[in-house]
Every structure is written in structure tokens, then in C-alpha cells.
Image (tube, grey):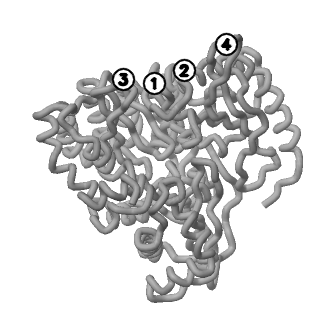
Amino acid sequence: MNKIEQLKAEKDGLVVWDDLERFARDGWESISETDLERLKWVGIFHRKTTPGFFMMRVRVTHGFLSADQAETLSDVARQFGRSAVDLTTRQQIQLRWLTIEAIPEALRRMALVGLSPLQTGMDSIRNVVGCPIAGIDPREIIQTIPLSRSITRGFLRNSDYTNLPRKFNIALSGCDGDCCHSAAHDVGATPARGPDGALGFNISVGGALGGSDPRFAVPLNAWAPPGRIRDIVLAILDLFRDHGPRETRTRSRLKYLIDEWGIDRFRDELERRLGAPLAPAGVSLLARHGEDHLGIHEQAQPGRFYAGIYVSTGRIGSRLLKEAARLSREYGAGEVRLTTQQNLVIPHLPESRLSDFQADPALNEMPLNPSAIRRGLVVCTGNDFCHFALIDTKGLAEELVGKLEAMEAWTQPHRIHISGCPHACGQHRMGDIGIQGARTKINGEVVPAADVFRRSGHQELYQLGQEVASRIPWSDLPELLVSIGREIDEARAQPVIQ
């Protein structure tokens, strides 16, 4: 067994939750190396770049926060974490600079408003993601919020699912736009019309973007009504837990079990586990892929609107998170939603308050309509907090978009996704333009650089960016990206390929 399998065999990851008070009493240096790993199961990560300090990743199912929850996270970050708050591409929140002594109190405060970091790291099921305008989207086909919550209840705090071969990602899309990139997940469910015209989901399996073998999920050739999705997802988890490869960490994702078995055997084994056949795939109702939700939009509810507001590089901080909570209370219904593009949505704005909302000073810092260059920006953590990242992604991203804006590089949005390393937390292959952090030498000095990826621009529903340049010094990126943006614009004029 590799060392992670060994530590799981010795003690389940969730058991370390019971040791937190002792760790807080004895200090971080008393924590063994194996327990530092186990802490990731409860969403607490010791950061090598900031010795003695921890990051906490908070689960926000489907990206839905109440104003009370947002305000509590803001207060915890301000009091215990130097006010550092990041939004992630999985609709979660990351707090930083926490000491082990402060963590029990932080957890108690979060629990009072129904929040927890449990199972947001290591070999667990990560946040179930979905459309941030679910329930209010005029184009919504299937309501997915209850399904996300039901699936989460099925695995959270459940020891049956705390020892998977590796992490596991789930996405549910209930509209025709698929802003949560379902094909990039271990399990993705997208709306489709099945037998007798019934509405349900087509299911795909085995997607993953990180490492040297990124790929989209493959169709399972299965359609399911909404009421069956939870059981299917949990059965897939059972198969992955019991049969997924565990010998080599880099080859332990679900996609490698599907490689070994083939999709037909995987489907047969899933039906056997479910004890009932699966209907064949239905007619897909997807029409688009990716949407940022920024700006003011009508809701399905008459007289109500939602506002998508931009958070630069996803680094919101405690002050602006509290401002978002205030905006949601003052103008809406006390709800803040997180997007997979690291932005926010404030729903349920009455038409009579729109003018006041748009004039609120907070929107000077979190604009409704950022420039075409900024509005598609997605950025991973970077090397100020992550030891895997090769560059300061967030700082360099701000520098890059500033130069592109000054050059008036383009007027139509192009999604720019930036990852600091091959783990692809910035989902760089999903952007129109993708950047993976690198380093290169100029006159003997090591400087930040980038491997550059681009999608063809032909508007295929799903498409991985392909590498077009490597080790480009960061200072040389703006001119290259302007050229790539023009090429994409030209390609966009071509017919859509479904």
C-alpha cells in the first residue's frame, strides 16, 4: 500500500475530528505527520508555505449561503484568519491563516449556522456543484437543489464513503447552459428527455481535469428520472470504493477504473448494484456550455431579479463577504449564491429596489458588469498559499488583465482560466484561453512563465483546451493573448458543432 492507504487503514480520516480539542491544547507541532494528513478529511489543511497556519475549506452545497452564514464566515475570517477569504471553482469558501488553537471555536460558530468543513479534502466526495440560479432561472428544466442536498446527506458523516481510492466530484445541471462543467466531473448529470417524453438526466462518468491525463467524462448511456439520481450516484460511489485502483495515487481516479473495465461492464456492474436496469440515454436538452451570470437578470418569479456580481480572482476577503451579506438582506431575501466562476449571485431583488441596488457603493468594488477581459477570469490559489503552485497566480492575473485592458485587447468576453500547476484547480483547460503556471530563465534569472492553452473557438459544447505555447515569460503574455483572442473570434464565426 502507498502511504495514504496505510494511514487510512490505521485510522479513518474522520476520526481525527475527535482530536481537534487536544491538538488545540497541545499546539500544531504536537500533531503527527499522519494526523496532519487526516485533518484534510475534515477540511483543515496545514500549509507548508505558512508553517503553523491552516486553511479551512467550507462546504457550501450547490453554492447556496444564507446571509447569516456569509456573515459568520466573514466574522470568523476577520477574528481568526487575517480577513482572508477565497471563493473556489467548486462553490466553496476557503479561510486562511487559522491557528490550530482557534479552529475549535471557529468550528463552533460555523456549526451554529449549519456550516462545516467536513470531507472537503483528501479521499472524499467534494462539494456537489450546480447552477447558482437554480430555482429562479426562467430557462430551468429540472430543479436540482433538493437533489444536491439529498446526495450530500447520503455521504456526509457516513463512514461508508470516507475511504475512497481518491477524491470524487459530482455536478448536477438542471438547465440548458451547464455552467458547472458537468463533463469535467467523476459523475455529471445533465437534463434530457427520456421515455415517453419524461424529464430527467443523462449521466456521464469519469471526467477529471488535473494531472497529465485530463479528459471529459464518457456517456454512461443511461437516463434517470430525478427521483433516482441519488441512488445512482451512491451506487457509483460504492463501485469506486470497492473496485477503484488504489496502488498508485496518480492513477486512482474513477476514470482509470472505467479504462480497466470498459464503459459497458461498468454500466452492467452498476445495474447489478442497483438491482434494476437503467434506461438508455435520452435526448439531451443542453444547448450551451458555460455562463457567468453577471449583471441584472429577470427571474422566473414575476417582478423579481437576480444580480451576478464580480469578485476579482475570487479573493473576496471578509469585508466584501460581509458587504455581500448586507446587500442580500437590504435588497433581496437574505441569500448569497456562489458560482463556479468565483463570483456571487444575489437573488430575489424586487423591481422597485433595482435602482437603489445598482447605486449601492459596494458595487464599485464588486461590479455587475466588469470588462470583457475580467468577466471570464478564473484563478487558482497560487503559491502564496499553495506549495504546488509555481507562480503567484492571483497577483500575476491582476497584472495581466490590467495590461490587456490597457491594450483594449478585445470587446467580447473570452474566458481566461489560470492554474498554478498541473493539478488544474483553476480549470485552465476549460477556458477559451488557459494558462498553467511555469518558470523559465531570462539572463540566468528564474522568472514567472506560462504554458498557454486554447480552445478552437468553434463552439463545440465540450472541448478541452490544447497547448499552443510553453514557458512563455509572463511579461510576454499580453501580446500572445491578444493574438489568440483574435483567432478565437474568427473561429467563432464558424457553424456550431453539437
Closer to the observer: label 3 or label 4? Answer: 4
Helix, strand or loop at label 2? It is helix
Image coords of residue 1 (percent x, y): 39, 60
> Residue sitting at 32 percent across and 35 percent down?
46
Type of amino acid at the residue the image marks with label 2: Gly
Q: Earlier in the sequence, mark 3 or mark 4?
A: 3
Say whether residue 318 is visible: yes
The image quarter in which residue 67 lies: top left
| Label 4: how many Cα within 10 Å (few below 14, some 14–19, many 20+) | few
Closer-to-camera residue (229/380): 380
**Residue 319, numbered circle:** 3
In the rendered image, the vertical position of residue 331 relative to residue 269, given as above or below: above
From the image, tell me which residue sits under label 2: 395
- Front disc: 4 or 1: 4
Query: What amino acid type should be assigned to the residue bearing mark 3?
Result: Arg
Relative to 174, residue 225 above or below:
below
Q: Work out whether residue 355 can be spotted.
A: no
Mark 4: amino acid: Gly
Q: Secondary structure at mark 3?
A: helix
Q: Which residue is mark 4?
A: 444
Q: Identify the element where label 1 is drawn.
A: loop
Residue drawn at point x = 30 percent, y = 35 percent: 73
Marks 1 and 3 sit apart, C-alpha to C-alpha, by 20 Å
In the image as oriented, which residue stretches furthest toward the front?
1
Label located before the other in sequence (4 or 1): 1
**Mark 3 or 2, nearer chain start:** 3
Sequence-first tag of 2 and 1: 1
Give the mark toward the camera: 4 or 2: 4
Mark 3 or mark 2, which is nearer to you? 2
Q: CA distance from mark 4 to mark 1?
A: 23 Å
Label 2 close to label 1 by CB (< 8 Å): yes
Q: Which mark is residue 384?
A: 1
